[in-house]
Amino acid sequence: MALKGTLKDFGLPDIVQLIGLQRKTGTLHLKTEGESVNVVFDGGNIVAGQSSTSRPSDRIGSTLLTQGAITKDQLDRGLSIQKQTMQRLGHILVSEKIISEDTLRRAVEAQLFQVVFRLFRWRQGEYNFETQNTVDYERMGVVPLGADFVLMEGIRMVDEWPIIERRIPSMASVFKRTIEPSQVGARGSEEEGPDGPASGLGAGYGAGYGTGKLALSPDELLVFNAVDGRKTCQQIVESTPLHDFAVCRTLLDLMDRDLVALTEVKGLTASVKSADSGGASALAFMAVAILAALFGVYRNLASPFGVFGLPPLIQPAVNTASSIRLLERLEIADGRIRGFRLAYGRLPSSMDELVSEGLATKGSVSGLTLTSSRTGYAVEASGPGGPVKIDRVFEIRSAPVREASPASPAGSKAPPLAGASKK
């Protein structure tokens, strides 16, 4: 199968879906400015990934050492055996009973997630799929990622990253705990009540039935325990068997529950302190601005010709900005619809089905409507200047007319093939 081109012409979701549907085995080579990535497929499933920007600390041995799963002596012992046997380090560590297969699986999975899902944020690049009979990868502990799963998770990650970045400025962000570790417990722990975890208590209450502890999932507990007021977000990623998106998403959830708080962004501390020192003057300026605005409203209403609203020269600009923002929402929704169609081979019945399948939140599709037909679909919303809409039609291609044969009537045609294209 010849599969080569640019990501502008053929996006990563389409590539992954095509390789998965055809159950191909081989290596997908992707390249963009400053980085190249190889993604290994076995029978249509993703089983390994490697980036040219990977550091020594990204290797499985260093990862397990940083996470505290093995000691330096155990790593040296495993590397010594590797030199003699040429076996993979993960296999050696499990065979020597240094780690469990589950520990290895989580470490390998985190590395694979780290490489693969970051590709969904690429906006440009080149790709080339090389078909192979067999591929080499760390087979012990690996959990192949199916094309549908990768597609769904990739779309969700791309959708949620902007939300995360508004609250977590960079991977150099440092967090501190706002409650003591003794106040939290593992969800599903032995301290649960007789009928299991309490439900409907809000903010995760339920662990430690009758003790008032906050219930955290295993991943949440891992991240919470890694927060110490000194580690950056990137260091938390390296000290846990989780990839960067999972750590950032968990930190955001913990922030929303007031369990951790952002303290600084390393490298920006000086500017943050400077902003803090000027906080009083900023508040004074804001107060003056508010008073001036209120005075302007009063003068406007006191005038015989006063009209409560925006000046005529400003209103068009505000409407344009609102329409642009609304169009951005529609484009995000359109990407989710196309992702749904790639995964299920059909269009969603409504925007609510995207929510039920985990591809969108209720807030992100609020006010948007989906209208489908035999030839395409439209996603639409009401804007300040009228409806804002994105139309897509399916390109219909007909196969060449076959010559008449005893087995088929003259002039018969193959059924049309449908593919999506923007109008």
Image (cartoon, helix red, strand yellow):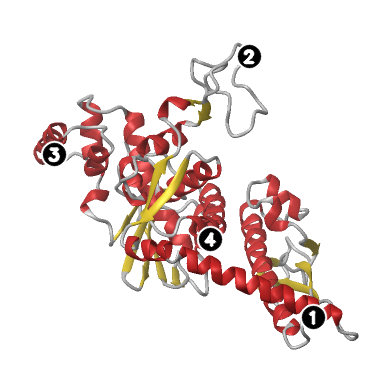
Q: Nearer the viewer, residue 146 or 93?
A: 93
**In the structure shown, which secondary structural element does the residue marked by tag 3 occupy?**
helix
Compared across the picture, whether 132 is left or right of 298 comes to: left
Mark 1–mark 3 distance (CA, rounded to whole Å): 79 Å
Residue carrying label 4: 162
* Picture residue at 32% right of the left edge, 29% below the top: 101
Which label is found at residue 175? none
Q: Earlier in the sequence, mark 2 or mark 4?
A: 4
Disc 2/disc 4 C-alpha distance (Å): 39 Å
Q: Nearer the viewer, residue 298 or 243?
A: 298
Of circles 3 and 2, which is in front?
Answer: 2
Q: Nearer the viewer, residue 33 or 82?
A: 33
Q: Are marks 2 and 1 in contact (CB under 8 Å)?
A: no
In the image, residue 228 sits, relative to residue 116, either above or below, namely above
Q: CA distance from mark 3 to mark 4?
A: 41 Å
Name the residue type under label 3: Leu
Badges 2 and 4: C-beta atoms under 8 Å apart? no
Quarter of the figure with the N terminus: bottom left
Of pointers 1 and 4, the one earlier in the residue sequence: 4
The amino acid pointed to by label 4 is Pro
Residue marked by disc 1: 299
Q: Classify mark 1: residues with Cα within 10 Å, few (<14), some (14-19) or many (20+).
A: few
Q: Residue at x 63, y 47 (%)?
A: 358
